[in-house]
Image (cartoon, grey):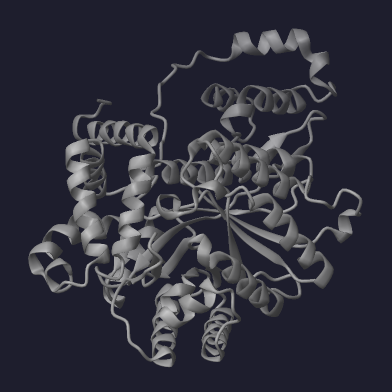
């Protein structure tokens, strides 16, 4: 239609138009009539001329253009590795063998099962699994991965130091990486690791902190709901201050429920200290698969409102279901989906959070990061953001993020949506009264979460990622189908 309109306008001595595809017919006709027939004020008065103009416009040949999926930006090597891992996880035999091996490596103290010390294990684990889900073992590897993520179109990265501690069902602490008996030295090593992490991300990015990574002494303080040791307070302050100085943000990761009560208390203290004057530096994590997630959000929101600081939340479904207290978790996946989706809707709209009696000015400042790999939840959040923005009722514009190596299809679709919205906002649209105005749009930022550390330090993280991928069987099948189609398009020029 645009070529026909421009052809006619050039014949009439006017400049060609550029309008969005969705508005081409209406906007072009209104523009032509307002210029060719200036005596007419509205489109309804141009009925006869409208038909005459259509008869005078030359015919145009329709062309089918391929729809961009976003996967066009992903290297073929990454797509092939996704397909290989999907093949392993979809096979009960192969996945069982792989999980047993990874579980052994994650919890064994034997050199034989340490991929950093065993070159045979490292040759298997690193290219197939570590490189898929982790950023690198040192600064050179991390910077290379970070830059490749930015080239895909992501706004930035969240980099996490992989060392952590988990507690087994027999109440034994299992740490990734090496530990020492000196608590102060252990905390110092954790602090240095996270300060190095900040050096790698650069301005405008994020880091993620796992508090149990500071060693058994800190893990025991968390488990017993004690205040942080003095050296831990010093370490956390040093990390927060450096993050603030280089304009980064940080989140405190959720961990097992035996640690989580104290993690929430320590994180709230950090938010009181650093999330002031409308800024959000420190984010707490809420896990929607827990039955207490909504009550926890409302409690923290009321604290922020009463004490005048910004509540910053990273919302996830949860990643510790394999070793959590089952009675604390929603009974079904559907209940977890409902929990996640309703929390998102209520935070974006500011409803059902205990502030209905307050004026809008008193609603507390809140920042939100939506971490998730569920396509339906992400689509609902995206659509609600756009709807509330149009109505000027959006309380917060959230960021989106996915873990490296997971839901790449979803991430690429989101990137494509962001590109499409930005492109449409650069054009002019025609309103009902034939005046021209900028299209009001909001574009969330999209980040990729990366974990770095030695292969051994990242083993428990790798094991959780593989369990989570296996649990999302439908999502994995859809992803493999999309990868095959993209490879078919590249290699054969058609979908397969």
The image quadrant of residue 234 is bottom right
Return the x and y of residue 153 as percentages of the image width and height.
Answer: 43, 54
Up-down: is 426 above or below 91? below
Up-down: is 259 above or below 404? below
Up-down: is 117 above or below 461? below
For residue 438, side relative to residue 152 (left or right): right
Return the x and y of residue 120 as percentages of the image width and height.
Answer: 8, 64
Q: Residue at x 42, y 30 (%)?
A: 67
Q: Could you say which is closer to the camera, residue 36 or residue 384?
A: 384
Image quadrant occupied by the N terminus: top right
Return the x and y of residue 34 as percentages of the image width and height.
Answer: 76, 27
Q: Is residue 281 visible?
A: no
Q: Could you say which is closer to the camera, residue 354 or residue 205?
A: 354
Q: Residue at x 42, y 44 (%)?
A: 412
For residue 337, side relative to residue 94 (left or right): right
Q: Residue at x 87, y 48 (%)?
A: 356
């Amino acid at each position: 239609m645009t070529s026909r309109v421009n052809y006619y306008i050039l014949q009439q001595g006017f400049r060609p138009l550029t309008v969005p595809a969705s508005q081409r017919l209406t906007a072009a006709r209104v523009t032509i009539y307002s210029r060719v027939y200036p005596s007419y004020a509205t489109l309804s008065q141009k009925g006869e001329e409208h038909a005459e103009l259509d008869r005078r416009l030359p015919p145009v040949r329709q062309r089918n253009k391929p729809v961009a999926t976003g996967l066009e930006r992903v290297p073929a090597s990454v797509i092939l590795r996704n397909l290989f891992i999907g093949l392993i996880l979809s096979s009960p035999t192969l996945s069982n063998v792989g999980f047993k091996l990874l579980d052994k490596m994650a919890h064994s103290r034997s050199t034989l099962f340490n991929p950093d010390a065993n070159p045979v294990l490292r040759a298997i684990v690193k290219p197939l699994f570590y490189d898929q889900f982790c950023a690198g073992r040192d600064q050179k590897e991390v910077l290379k991965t970070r830059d490749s993520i930015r080239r895909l179109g992501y706004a930035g990265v969240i980099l996490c130091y992989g060392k952590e501690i988990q507690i087994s069902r027999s109440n034994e602490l299992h740490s990734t990486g090496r530990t020492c008996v000196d608590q102060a030295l252990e905390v110092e090593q954790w602090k240095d690791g996270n300060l190095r992490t900040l050096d790698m991300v650069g301005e405008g990015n994020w880091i993620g902190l796992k508090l149990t990574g500071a060693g058994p002494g800190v893990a025991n303080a968390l488990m017993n709901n004690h205040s942080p040791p003095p050296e831990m307070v010093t370490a956390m302050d040093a990390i927060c201050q450096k993050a603030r100085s280089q304009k980064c943000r940080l989140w405190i990761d959720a961990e097992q429920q035996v640690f989580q009560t104290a993690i929430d208390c320590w994180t709230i203290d950090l938010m009181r200290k650093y999330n002031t004057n409308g800024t959000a530096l420190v984010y707490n994590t809420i896990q929607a698969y827990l039955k207490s997630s909504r009550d926890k959000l409302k409690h923290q929101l009321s604290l922020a409102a009463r004490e005048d600081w910004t509540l910053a939340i990273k919302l996830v479904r949860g990643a510790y279901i394999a070793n959590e207290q089952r009675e604390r978790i929603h009974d079904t996946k559907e209940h977890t989906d409902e929990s996640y989706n309703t929390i998102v809707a209520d935070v974006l709209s500011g409803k059902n959070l205990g502030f209905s009696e307050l004026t809008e000015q008193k609603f507390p400042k809140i920042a939100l990061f939506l971490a998730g790999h569920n396509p339906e939840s992400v689509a609902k959040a995206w659509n609600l953001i756009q709807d509330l923005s149009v109505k000027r009722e959006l309380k917060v514009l959230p960021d989106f993020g996915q873990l490296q190596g997971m839901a790449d299809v979803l991430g690429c679709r989101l990137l494509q949506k962001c590109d499409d919205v930005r492109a449409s906002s650069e054009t002019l649209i025609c309103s009902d009264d034939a005046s021209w105005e900028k299209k009001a749009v909001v574009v969330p930022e999209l980040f990729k979460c990366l974990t770095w550390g030695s292969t051994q330090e990242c083993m428990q993280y790798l094991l959780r990622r593989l369990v989570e991928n296996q649990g999302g069987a439908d999502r994995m099948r859809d992803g493999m189908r999309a990868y095959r189609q993209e490879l078919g398009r590249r290699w054969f020029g058609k979908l397969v």
